[in-house]
Amino acid sequence: MDQIKIGRFIAERRKEKSLTQMQLAEKLGISDRAVSKWENGRSMPDSSIMPELCQLLGITVNDLFNGEVVVMENYNENTEKLLIEMAKEKEQADKRLLTMEIVIGVVSTLFLLTMIAVGSIFVTDDEKRWIFFLLFGIGLVQFIVCMQIALRIEQVAGYYECQKCGHRHVPSYGAVTMAMHFGRTRYLKCPHCGKRSWNKKVLKK
């Protein structure tokens, strides 16, 4: 999606409706700064207010995503292009998330090992052994928290593909947490065929 084009379109439609940024913001229950960011192409309207925004501007959601009023003859073609573009953007966002998962895992592991090493090297006096356990505890807590964050990222980024029927799905956080795994491949129950198999992480639906 072209955020710059969409922003200009929002500004044009707002002016056509004789609304200031402040007036539009008040009708939507948001700040005029948010409207300014849309119109400058720095952000997109939240999905929860898109229907109301489109109603106020006298456009459809499809018009909004295209950054122009879509003529009926081109409606299906534009919708198809938009869906393809959105799918590509999601795939790229999922790739970034999975890269972030790796970074979080590596950094948190190194931090834990550093705390253990520092405690082992510098705390040699038995009376100060509590310092070692404190450092170890700090490292362990951050490691557990970071692993939970990484696991959540893995759950929502992309899909898991059933080995039995090929169905691609997003399991619950609990199912991902409890599943046996090696790497990003997890032993999960498919919601489509109901069978358990090793589900591999994939990015495309």
Image (cartoon, grey):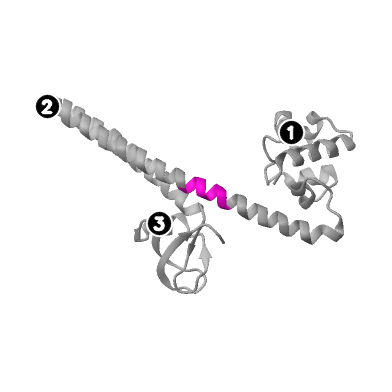
Q: Secondary structure at mark 2?
A: loop
- Cα–Cα gap, marks 3 and 2: 40 Å
Taking the image as shown, residue 142 lies to the left or right of residue 200, namely left
Number of numbered discs overlaid on the protein picture? 3
Q: Secondary structure at mark 1?
A: helix
By secondary structure, the bulk of the magenta-drawn segment is best described as: helix
Among the 4 quarters of the image, the one containing residue 180: bottom left
At label 3, the amino acid type is: Arg
Taking the image as shown, residue 55 lies to the left or right of residue 99, namely right
Residues at marks 2 and 1 touching, judged by CB atoms closer than 8 Å: no
Residue 178 sits above or below residue 40 on the image = below
- Cα–Cα gap, marks 1 and 3: 40 Å
Rendered location of residue 133, percent (x, y): 21, 33
Rendered location of residue 76, percent (x, y): 78, 61
Rendered location of residue 43, percent (x, y): 67, 37
Residue at image mark 3? 184
Q: Residues within 10 Å of mark 1 (few under 14, many from 20)?
A: many
Residue at image mark 1? 35
Taking the image as shown, residue 131 lies to the left or right of residue 13, namely left
Please give the range of residues in magenta.
Answer: 91-98
Depth order, front residue of 48/111: 111
Among the 4 quarters of the image, the one containing residue 177: bottom left
Depth order, front residue of 5/136: 5
Residue at image mark 2? 124
Residue plotted at (16% across, 29% down): 121
Residue 170 sits above or below residue 25 on the image = below
Q: Earlier in the sequence, mark 3 or mark 2?
A: 2
Q: Secondary structure at mark 3?
A: loop
